[in-house]
Structure formats: structure tokens, C-alpha cells
Amino acid sequence: MIYTRTKKPLNIAAIIVQYNTWQDTINCVESILSADDQPKWVIIVDNNSTNDAAQKILDWAQGRVIAPPCPVVDYLAPAPPIQTEEVFWSKNSHPQCPQAQLVLVHMPRNGGYAPGNNAGLKLGLEWGAEAFLILNNDTIVTRNAIGALYSRLTECARPGLCGGLLRYCHASLPIQCCAGGITNWWTHLSKFTGHGLTLEQAQNLSRDDVENKINFICGACVIVSREFVETVGFMDEGYFLYCEEQDWACRSKGKFDLAYAPDALVYHKEGATTGWNGNTLRLKSLYFLTRSRIRCTYLHHPWMLPTVIAGIGFASARLLLKKLVSKFTRG
């Protein structure tokens, strides 16, 4: 079966930041290119991968590489060749609007999640995109997800950020979150709305109830309006990983809506690049999370720093104790 586009693409730019894990990126892009509603541009930002990830993506576009499909999601992979344009990123460069739908951006260094997304946002603004779909490279969108996200965003009174229904790709496929969650600023600990529910349970939740509860949108899948970026600004590049979404929410509070598109089902493998998959956690990831929580608190709720730092100390001690108990139990 040959993939053909039957609809005019939406005037949005999808942005996918990747580092080394090219197989996940290809799965994500394939799902986007098989969606009912597609972005005008799919911008893959390679964060100066230490392997041949960027070349693998170019080879895939030409049909020379095939990535193993995600076993839990069916989608119609596009037939190669797929026209692709390359951009070698420089803050002083202003690449012309590409003719190709797929754009591969080469970053000169791995500055982290925020600089990678900001490069995509700046290109999209330059090319006239009216919204930006930011996706983790280990996500898979279902056929109507992009259209549902865009529709919910644009019907908001103050279109800002909108998230979908994120579902894990592991175990029994529980729900990761409905759009986002709630951060307790006194501890800077966050709880995802709908976390752990079955798909049926999550679909029975009221959209209005979810939107009234959440105070941030999960960064793994979020569509952002052009006005939001132009008003609030780009992601804070002081964060290498984690808390960018809480920072955006704090900076935009009272100015833009946080919305939920329950029909936008997106699967998330979670943690392919960072090492956090819900069950395991690398110390490097823990370091970046801790640093980001302290930075976000300092910038937006500095009077809460003592309780946040105390909470981090308690959580670290509990994690260490858990690891020690597990080690001795296995031994």
C-alpha cells in the first residue's frame, strides 16, 4: 500500500528533538506522516548525536534504512523516497522556507532540550507557522491526534498550550497523563492527571474538569500557539532537561489557556534518551531533574526554596534507602 496525502497540511511545524535514538525518531515521524491531518513542516533537530543518527534518518528517507515499528501502534509508514532538506543551525542564519515537508536540523552541540526546541521554534516563526507541535522523539501519534490537538487549541479563548491523552507503550498500556498535571510549588513535586488509569477510565473524565485542575502541560506532547511564543518567549535554555513545561506555565499564567484534547491519543515509550522510564532512573537524569526543580523555584517562587530543597533531600534519602534494601534483598 502506497502512502499518499489527501489533505492540505495544517500551517503548523512539528518539532522533534533527538539525540542518538534515531529508531524512535523514525517511528515518530512515520506516525506523523501517516496522520489524517499533517503539519506543514516536520522539523527534526539532531542535538549533535554522538553516533550516526542523523545519517540514519537521511538514509531512512531514501529507503536505505528501515526502523523496527512500534509493536503496540499500527500506522501506515510513508513510502520512500521522502524529500528532506538539511539545515546546519547557526543563531545568525535565516534559512529560507523549505520546499520539503521534512527538515533535518544539525545542531553544533548538545545544549539540551530547550535549545533544540528553540531552534525549531525560531525556524517555524521565520517560515510563518501559526502553531508548533512539540513531541518527544519516543512518542507515536495516532491518526487523528494532530487534528484534535490543533482544533482544541484554536477554539480556546486565549490559545496557549494544549496537550493530548498520553498512554504508555509498556506493561498494560496505562495512561501517563491527560494533557499534563499539577505541580505543588511548595515541594515542586508533580502529579500527572489521570496517571495509571485505563484508557476507558481516562476517556470518561470530563475535559473541563481536567483543564480546571492542571497547572502545566506535559512537554512530551504539546501544541503551542504562535502568539504564545511571541508573547511569553522561547523555552528557558538554563534548563538542560526537565521543568521547561512548568517554567512556560509559570511565565504565561493568567495570559493564555492550558487546554486538553481528549481525542488526541499519543503513545509514549518514555525515557529512551534520558534514562527515565517510570521504573528506572539514571543518576545523571536525577541530577538534571534536581537542578531544574531548584532553578524553576528560584525563578518563580523563591520564597519556597527551603521547602523544595528539604523535599529533595528527603526524596534522595528515600531513593538511596530503597536501592540499598533492593541490593541486599537480591544479595
Image: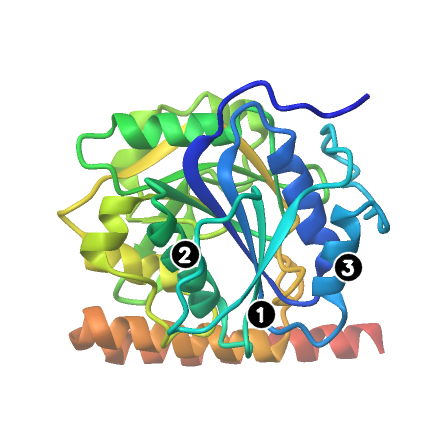
Of labels 3 and 2, the one closer to you: 2
| Element assignment for label 3 | helix
What distance separates the C-alpha of mark 3 from that of mark 1?
14 Å
Q: Residues within 10 Å of mark 2 (few under 14, many from 20)?
A: many
Between 295 and 126, the one lying in front of the other is: 126
In the image, what residue occupies the spot 59% across and 28% down?
35
| Element assignment for label 2 | helix
In the rendered image, the vertical position of residue 138 relative to residue 243, given as above or below: above
Residue 100's image quarter?
top right
**Is residue 66 shown left or right of residue 33?**
right
What distance separates the C-alpha of mark 3 from that of mark 2?
23 Å
Quadrant occupied by the N terminus: top right
- Residue 225, percent across and down? 30, 42
Residue 302's image quarter?
bottom left
- Badge 2 or badge 1: first in the primary sequence: 1
Number of marks present in the image shown:
3
Residue at image mark 1: 47
- Residue 293, percent across and down? 37, 72
Q: Residue type at mark 2: give it.
A: Leu
Residue at image mark 3: 56
Residue at image mark 2: 123
Residue 311's image quarter?
bottom left
The answer to whether residue 265 is seen in the rendering is yes
In the image, what residue occupies the spot 57% across and 23% down?
36
| Element assignment for label 1 | loop
